[in-house]
Image (cartoon, rainbow, N blue to C red):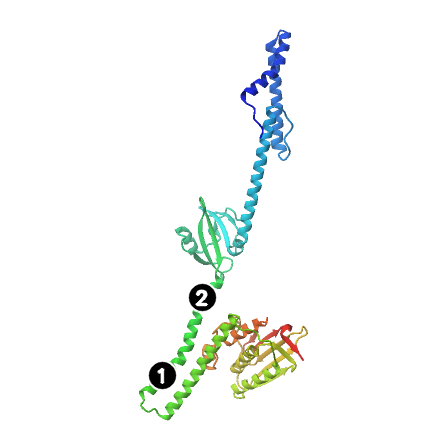
Amino acid sequence: MRQLPSSKNLFIKVVIFLLPFFLIGMFFNAPIESLCIGLVCLIVWHYHQLSLLIDWLWKKRGAYPPASKGIWADVFDGIYQQQRKHRKKRNELTVLVRRFRLGAESLPDAALVFNNDRTLVWCNSLAQKMLGFKWPEDMGNRIDNFLRQPEFIEYLELENYEKPFEFPSPVNELTILECRIAPFEKDKWTLIARDITQIKQIEQMRKDFIANVSHELRTPLTVMRGYLELLTESDVPEAAIWKKAHAMMNEQTIRMDGLVNQLLTLTKLENKQFVLAQSKVNVARLLQMIAEEAKTLSDNKHIINLDIEPNLFISSSEEQIRSAFSNLIFNAARYTPAGKSINISWKALDNGGARFVCRDTGDGIPAEHLSRLTERFYRVNQARTRDSGGSGLGLSIVKHILANHNSDLEISSQVNVGSTFSFTIPAQFIVKE
């Protein structure tokens, strides 16, 4: 570390500098005038060094300091060392800020910082996407100019942020956001908003599931309870009453058993508990069997046309494949009026895959229902589906089975014309003989 000169040393240096001027003045009998000349020279030299300093500080800030001697060398060196320290500190702060911003950008939630007057200080990219901000254009604008929901404004004004607040995204009203506000630093607050749309949908599905299962089980249980009470009240029930009661209770028991089995199947599919047994499924034979069962189901009131390639097999679980095919074909038989046709095809594709199509000529399905058909217990016509023996779970089961085969259920329909249900099985599951 450079040793700084003391006041005594500085005084000695000035005396040494002026001494030659004094001696020359004594020689010419003008010591005062000579000392004044020496002082002027000293002042000019210091002024020159000061000019070098100003020029270096304002015009050549990135360069090394100019060469100098004496006390000015200490000044230049001291300023240069301070500049290096500040530059190093600034670089460290820049890296720290960059890391903070990168960390904030990597958050899975929208994040923003605002002042007490609700003006925006900073926001990440998700805040721009989910809340509609533009950065840095909106810096300094009030956040309530963008988040205008009255409930949110009231939440801000209360300044009681212990509980989170839920509100629809100003960018997309179908997206539900949950926000939390917490102190950031003096006079500043941070707002974190996350997308909870899927959580809300799951909660609603759970509520709907409980309500639907309760409703589905209530009817058969009510029927069975009614007949049991009737039989209990009669000492010796008549044969006709007993026969009817037995038939109805048996029918409702079968219905409940089928519902429970479908629920178990769906739960296993959703939880990925089904293991695809790699057996070679004879699709042609399977479809012919299901078509015959569908004819029996509809008392041979439909014309079922099959267009099937006989040597096109699927390497998969026969139980799952049968469930997918039968649900689609039985649905077509249930909702196609008597005397009309159902067309079923199973064809190879050029890419090595295979495509299944089930096209009926029924009443068709309104377009607003198509996107929800694969939801559990969803019915276009509640009474008609229940009367036909449908549980509202079949298409949901088909969707999950196809997902296990890297496929999706495609649905198209036209009212008073008919509906088409189709899917493509990728080449990795297809075996040709």
Q: Earlier in the sequence, mark 2 or mark 1?
A: 2
Question: On the image, numbered disc 1 is attached to which residue?
Answer: 226
Q: Nearer the viewer, residue 92 or 351?
A: 92
Q: Position of residue 154 (x, y in %)?
A: 41, 53
Residue at disc 2, secondary structure: helix
Q: Is residue 337 visible?
A: yes
Quarter assignment of residue 45: top right
**Residue kind at label 1, given as amino acid type:** Gly
Q: Position of residue 197 (x, y in %)?
A: 48, 62
**Residue kind at label 2, given as amino acid type:** Glu
Task: Classify residue 350 as left or right of residue 4.
Answer: right
Q: Establish if 184 lies above or below 30.
A: below
Q: Position of residue 148 (x, y in %)?
A: 46, 54
Q: Position of residue 214 (x, y in %)?
A: 41, 74
Instruction: Specify the quadrant that holds the C terminus.
Output: bottom right
Q: Is residue 416 visible?
A: no
Question: On the image, numbered disc 2 is attached to which residue?
Answer: 203
Residue at 60% x, 22% y: name it. Answer: 46
